[in-house]
Amino acid sequence: MSFNLLNIANSGVRASSELLQTTSKNIANVNTEGYVRERTEHSTMIDNQVGRGETYRLLNEFAQKQLNRDTSNKTFFDQFTSEANRIDSLFSQESNSLSTNINSFFNNLQEALNQPSSSVARSLVMTDAESLLNQMDRLSGIVSEQKSIVNEQLDIFTSEANTLIKNISSLNKEIASVNGTNNAADATSTYNERDKAIRELSELIDIETLDGPNGEKLVFMGTGESVVMQDGSFNLFSIKGDPDPNLKTFQLDVDNGKAISLEIDTNKLKGKIGGLLSFRDDILIPAQSQIGQMGIAIADAFNQQNHLGMDANGELGGDIFTIPEVNGLAYQANTGGSGMTATLEPGKGSELPASDFIISYTSATTVEIQPIDNKGEPIGSPSAADVIAGEINSSTVTSGEAFGLKINVSGTANVGDEFQVKLSSGAAGNISLKTDRGEDLALASPIRTLSNLDNIGTGSLSFSEVTDVTTGSFGSSPLSLTNGPITLVKTANPDEYTVSDGVNTSTFIATQPTENMLNQAGGAFANYGFDFNLTGIPTVGDSFTIEVNEGGFDDNRNGLKLANLQNEDLVRQNVVASATADNGKTFNQAYASLVTEIGVVTGQAKTSGEAFDALAQQSEAWYESLSGVNLDEEAANLLRFQQSYAASAQILSAARTIFDTLISAAR
């Protein structure tokens, strides 16, 4: 009997000791990150012996996988909103508003129209023009700085992800080496460390896991690419920029660079890395492109209208702004020796979209022009163009459009060579003033109309508009009409007129209404680049003169056209639009749309982030309810197992007493 009691007591003490050790371990690791609560269970007593205890982790793998998924979604929106909030705040501040500078520029231009001969008023316009460019440069600089920060964070997060992947692979090997052996129960800390590394990896990217054959965990990206595989093999992440070294792409470096890297669909990427890339692609890139597009549209429209007027020096107006030239970025796979630069074709600012372009050689002398979105995906159908005399522009396009681009090509390209042109984003902070002289503002019209003092009818000429000053109608230094003043004489009733410029003469019957008289005269007169209307009823013999607006004192007719640019839809809205669509915006509308878009995207991210934060908290609570250490429960277990241990010890003491008594009786 005492022998049986001794066996029962010994096994009870051993079992209780194991239970106490497990409970003590749980209590000691209550604050250990990644620790999974353990439980020891014993089999039914056989032959007076309690079976050896089996210790295992209390883990619900479904809850663990759901927690990893929700963690990836939560960290995605946490990262996105923390970055986007800064940009949203900066762009929404009145002191950073580009609209304020645009309004101030055109308001001072209106003041100059009230006193066009005032050098002070003209100087204020130029001062505001410089302030407008400085504000564009500042906003573009803010965006560029944020892009640099994104690149730095991508480097850090990618390095962290690669370190975690290596750790997971190494821990998988350790687990596989003890799986199925008596040492497996002692490797719970290795399991915990591996699961913690997987959890940390899920904060950086979205992942899925599968059980391997030897206790391993195979890790895949949410998009299906293998990250940690069987037998300890793994793939790492790499980031590089092709063709733009400042725009890094996220890739999976397969087999330590021995195989072609896999492109990752960043649209589906979650975690902190996905949040960074989405912030860059959805906010930073569009913002910088739209700022550049607006700047180019303003500069080009102002330059072109200024060309059609006369400045304070009595000459035709010139450029006020300088639109920069950007280098085409060659892809690393190019095999030819070609290069290219791009700028805006003058007068085409309203045709330039807020997008980048890929120029692909289809032959040595033909290319395709493909607009791309903020993620590098094609928009619409590509245009085809010839390379003529080393240039690509609207006149060399054979199908589609040139999108306002003027591209200069050098060297020889091979079929398949590609270049990326980033005119809008590249020009955002590089537009400058070509002149700071207020006298160079062409507020006056270069021509004027006069009625002969001997006219007896009620007819008078009214200026229509100047549309072109490059046709040879004007001479310079000093400004003049090439063939001299133009005269218009009514030669017969009811509507016969003769027009002459000293070289050309044309007699014609005017149609009603008597508008655009030079165009009605036809011949050389139709190509003058300006026209006028006849109002009232002239009598036969009445004559009128069109001549250079010499002096142009207090003339603001072209200045009115310059001021009206603020109200014209000169900023292109979409790359692809129907013929009847309203595809243009004013400068203020374009900037308001940019600020609104940033605010809307940021607001949507905040809302989604709150939802996924709640889901992550639920998943965390679900996971912790089973795998987390509950001190109250463990304290109760500790008392219970202490009592069990004490009871087994008492049985052992009783067995020893009985055994000693039996030995004494037998002596």
Image: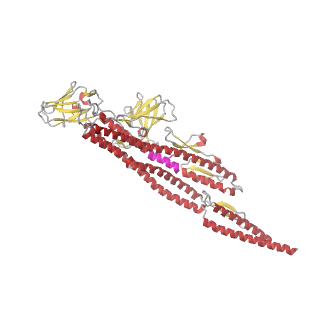
Q: 369 or 102: nearer the eye?
A: 102
Q: Which residues are magenta?
A: 265-284
Extreme residue toward the left, this view = 456
Q: Position of residue 423 (x, y in %)?
A: 42, 37
Farthest residue toward the top? Answer: 503
Q: Is residue 463 left or right of residue 257?
A: left
Q: How many marks?
A: 0
In this rendered view, identify the residue nearer to me: 37 or 144. Answer: 144
Identified at 42% across, 28% down, the residue is 390
Out of 561 and 210, give the one closest to the viewer. Answer: 561
Against 224, residue 385 (above or below) is above
Q: Does the magenta portion include 485?
A: no
Image location (x, y in percent) of residue 60: 60, 59
Residue plotted at (76% across, 70% down): 652
Q: Main secondary structure of the magenta part?
A: helix
Quadrant of res 378: top left
- In this rendering, does residue 171 appear at all? yes
Q: Is 638 left or right of 312, judged from the image as shown?
A: right
Q: Is residue 568 left or right of residue 257?
A: left
Residue 555 rendering spot, x and y as whole percentages: 23, 36
Quadrant location of the N terminus in the rendered image: bottom right
Residue 283 drawn in magenta: yes
